[in-house]
Image (spheres, rainbow, N blue to C red):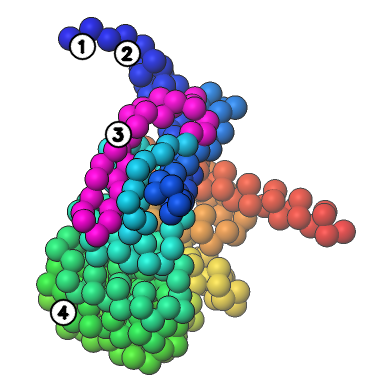
Amino acid sequence: MTGQNLDWFFDEWLYSAGYPEFEVSHAYDAANKQLRVTVRQVQDTDDHTPLFRMPVEIEVMDKSGAVTFRVTLEKREQEFYFAASERPLCVLFDANDHVLKTLRHEKSRQELQYQLRHASSFTARMRAARDLSAFRDEEEVAQALRRALLQDERGGVRMAAAVALGEMGSAEARDALILGLKKNTEARVRRAACWGLGRFRGDKKAISALARAAEQDDSYFVAAFAMRALAHAAGTEAYDTLIGMLGRDSYQDVLRATVFDSLAIAKDRRGVSLAIDHTAYGVQPSVRVAAAMAMAALGKEHEDERERVYHRLIELLEDKAFRVRLSAVKALAVLDDARAAAALRAVDEREAIDIIRSAARGAVRTLEEKAKKREENGKKEK
């Protein structure tokens, strides 16, 4: 027992809505050798979200090391002053992420680079990597993120660096991602590198690296990520590599299923016929499910393919495999063809499996809402 009244804590964190949203800024006064940290709680308090009261740690880093100060927040806006003999190299608000929150803390490129390399908290390094992506044209930033991708001890930081490099879009960032994809032994980091390379649309080096990862990576899930990223980067030019993956066995046929996800991402018309063929009874169920969903996305994208896609999905509503029937229901909602409403209502009446009946009702609602929205937009245009 603490002997303290903690009603305020339960009122704010348990019984009230929301969580704190912080905007933090800091400035150094060289004349007075003083650091000012301003903390604002910017959450909307009109929806029963309170102003929160809590202790928070502020870490100040300079050449001599790091010093942590503990402050108490309880107002909409507060200023805190700390003695500092020199300009801090980095200031961290709740460095170890003890508080559930959103945080916006604007910092210079130099501060973020220092934070990425020297912060002891891996979450602070992850946040620095994320925020550095805003400095797209800075060669030093690409180098800092490259170092983090290749050398940081925590996989989460390496993943954040890969994502940031993908958002930068420079040649230096692309080359760093290719190297990271090759050098990282942790599969989740290679997946993040694939995601980053997928942002380089039409880039031959990125496309080549992704195709190689799809065909050769030892992890099926990295290969699947590479396939989707390849579809983003190469579009319809990824077709030959993707269909080549139909011949590669994998755990639960994840790679064959991903072929169809990827063809839908690439918006490749040729995927329609291939998907229809792979919805045939006898094909592995996970592949049939992926093919049905890809069919719907491609049928919606290519209007002249809609009719045969629609009729095949209607047939699949009576398939022997319940997973395929469920995917057909969901796919008809994606296809967005109002004619499907009657068939979906019939599914709701005859199906014995509740999840399929529920999905059918949801698909009907989706079709009706989309039709209503189109009608309202049509009236506005007139």
Say which residue appears at 38% left-offset and 67% top-offset. 110
Residues at circles 2 and 1 in contact by the CB criterion of under 8 Å: yes
Q: Is residue 66 magenta?
A: yes
Mark 4 residue type: Lys
Amino acid type indicated by mark 2: Leu
From the image, tell me which residue sits under label 2.
Answer: 6
10 Å crowding of disc 3: few (<14), some (14-19), many (20+): few
Q: Position of residue 217 (x, y in %)?
A: 17, 79
Q: CA distance from mark 3 to mark 4?
A: 40 Å
Badge 2 crowding class, 10 Å Cα cut-off, few under 14, some 14 to 19, many 20 or more, is: few
Task: Choose the circle earlier in sequence order: 1 or 4.
Answer: 1
* Label 3 to label 1: alpha-carbon separation: 20 Å
Q: Is residue 364 left or right of residue 110?
A: right
Check disc 1 and report the residue beneath it.
2
Task: Give the distance between the C-alpha atoms of the residues marked 1 and 4, in whole angstroms.
Answer: 51 Å
Residue 64 left/right relative to 56: left
Query: Residue 285 is drawn in which quadrant?
Result: bottom left
Residue at the far bottom: name it: 204
Magenta region: which residues? Answer: 50-78
Choose the circle earlier in sequence order: 3 or 2. Answer: 2
Q: Which residue is mark 4?
A: 183
Residue bearing the label numbered 3: 70
Asked whether residue 45 is drawn in magenta, I would say: no
Query: Relative to 365, does residue 252 appear above or below in the rendering?
Result: below
Please identify the quadrant where the N terminus is shown: top left
Residue at 49% in and 27% down: 75
Q: Pointer 4: residues within 10 angstroms few (<14), some, or many (20+)?
A: few
